[in-house]
Amino acid sequence: MTRTWIAGSLALVLMVGCTATAAEDAAKARAVPRLYVDPAKGDDTDPGSPEKPLATVARALALAVEGKAEDILLADGSYGALEITATFPARVTLRPRPRAAGAQAPAKVLFERIAIAGAENVVLDGLHFSVPDARTAKHCYVHVSKSKHVVLRNLQIYGEINNEWAAKKSIAMGVGDSEDVAVEDSSMHHVQFGITVSRVKDIRVQGCQIGPFREDGIRFKNCDGVVCRDNHVHHSNKTLKEHCDGIQMIYWSHNVLLRNNHIHNVNQGIGAFASKDQKRRNWRVEGNLIYNIYNPNTMSIFDTVDAVIVHNTLPQAGLRLRGSTGAVVRNNIMAFPGSATSPDAVKDEDYNLFVGTEHTRDKPRGTHDLVGVDPQFVDAAKFDFRLRPTSPAIDSALGDGKRGKDMHGHEPVDAPTVPNTGAGQPPYADRGACEYVPPEGPEKP
Ligand SMILES: [Ca+2]
Ligand SMILES: [Ca+2]
């Protein structure tokens, strides 16, 4: 009896604890109004609760327009095509319903296509996109047009019918005529194009995995405010003479940051080709690693005014600057300097490491350039272009105060056994795209 009472009291205490937590959870749930959707078991006349979900996303979106949902949780299943055309009063997120405790399989909420047109405040998070059969027209899995404040996060987009169809007919993401759009941490492969962006103000593409693909990995046309960083773009399968870029800039884009992108095994790396009508302005190209490119365009920054091109590693190539003026070219590791068509293409070239000795540009080398020097990569044959501890690129760059983390997440550190032959702030940044981190840690002040 006593034992039962104690056990009962203990259970009551535990229950009170649980109730408090459940109450907190409930408060959080109320803070973000939620609706549940299940196409197999739901009914659009139901309230959209976990137990009584709605049947369609369209019904959930209609309720979200009225402010009754900011979080729309989708059960596993195939949803076909969806159009989102509303302006929502608060940001509305479509995402998979969280897994039950102990569930093994990842969520698979599969769409054939989502078009976001004339909409505002939309987030797609964790959704899959593919189609079961080849289509006659071109197929764009996620299409954003005339919209504002859109986030496309953690999406997986892939062709799985046959490579021939996928390679010629499919675009993973198309974004046009919009403002404030972010594409984050998404993966796309077996598509013709990865991400194509036209006439967008403030577009961010970051943390995406793109490849294999056929035509272009990421391309921007006539955009203002581009951040394209920490993307891995690899393996295009066009024949070697055909056009295809890891990242391509078509015509002008202004206020551009291309940072820490890892591009390889494509026909061209970063291709910002002719933009005769409007020269590009305010560009920073930093920390990119590009190799195994099948034609001379490993990094081509044409028709751009005063571009800052720093801390890139092009182990097999040089930089091409046709039609550009006033470039700052510092702290890069390149096979050779590359080419330009104008004597004023470069206004400041220094602190680079050139593996080869030839120099084709009119601008003289900077007094701190290292020429004909082995950068001592960890294992170039295996495409590991980090620096060995004895590399002359370590602690020898000119810091401009803006170098953040590199593509591996490393800030510049002061290697204690290497004299700081660099300058600026910090004086111990490294040349090239990969900051060396000594095993013994940085110099202690
Ligand atoms: Ca360093
Ligand atoms: Ca040092």
Image (spheres, rainbow, N blue to C red):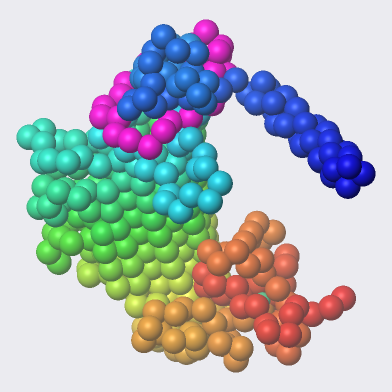
Residue at x-position 20% and y-position 55%: 214
Residue 282: say if magenta: no
Q: Please report the bounds of the magenta region as a residue range.
A: 64-92
Give the camera-side residue of 396 and 288: 288
Give the camera-side residue of 42 and 162: 42
Residue at x-position 84% and y-position 36%: 12
Looking at the image, residue 258 lies above or below residue 91: below
Residue at x-position 40% and y-position 72%: 314
Looking at the image, residue 240 lies above or below residue 45: below
Residue at x-position 35% and y-position 77%: 316
Q: x, y percentage for residue 342?
A: 36, 59
Q: Quadrant of the N terminus?
A: top right
* Residue 87 shown left or right of residue 15 in the figure: left
Which quarter of the picture shows residue 58? top left
Which quarter of the picture shows residue 55? top left
* Residue 267 shown left or right of residue 348 in the figure: left
Q: x, y percentage for residue 205?
A: 45, 45
* Residue 225 shown left or right of residue 43 in the figure: right
Q: Quadrant of the C terminus?
A: bottom right
Please indicate, yes or no, whether residue 341 appears anywhere in the rendered image: no
- For the view shown, which residue lies furthest in the right direction? 2
Give the camera-side residue of 331 and 164: 164
- Give the image quadrant in which the ligand numbered 1 is located: bottom right
